[in-house]
Amino acid sequence: MAELYLNKNPHENANHLTPKKETIAFLLSYSKALHVATHESIAFETIIN
């Protein structure tokens, strides 16, 4: 079991990640709809849909 983790570099496959267009569109629309209002030390997060 230890051999499975000792021989692999966790950053090796990170360069080959390519998100789908749908994922990018979802994240952009979510970030546009997210509104954070702060009052003193409290943050209120609302999704404006």
Image: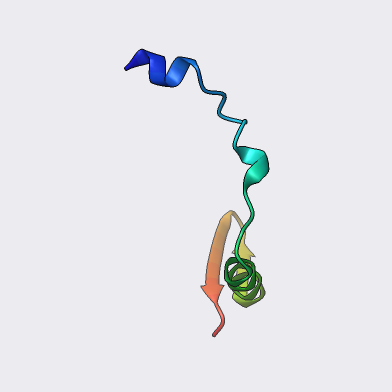
Front-most of residues 15 and 41: 15
Residue shown at 31% from the left, 17% from the top: 1
At which x and y percent is residue 40? 61, 58
Residue shown at 68% from the left, 40% from the top: 15
Q: Quadrant of residue 34?
A: bottom right
At which x and y percent is residue 22? 58, 72
Q: How is the image coloured?
A: rainbow
Label total for image: 0
Front-most of residues 37 and 5: 5
Residue shown at 58% from the left, 66% from the top: 23
Does residue 2 sit above or below 22 in this rendering?
Answer: above
Q: Quadrant of residue 44?
A: bottom right
Does residue 14 sit above or below 35 in this rendering?
Answer: above
At which x and y percent is residue 6? 47, 15
Q: Quadrant of the C terminus?
A: bottom right
At which x and y percent is residue 9? 57, 24
Q: Is residue 44 left or right of residue 24?
A: left
Q: Residue furthest bottom?
A: 49
Residue shown at 61% from the left, 67% from the top: 27
Front-most of residues 35 and 1: 1
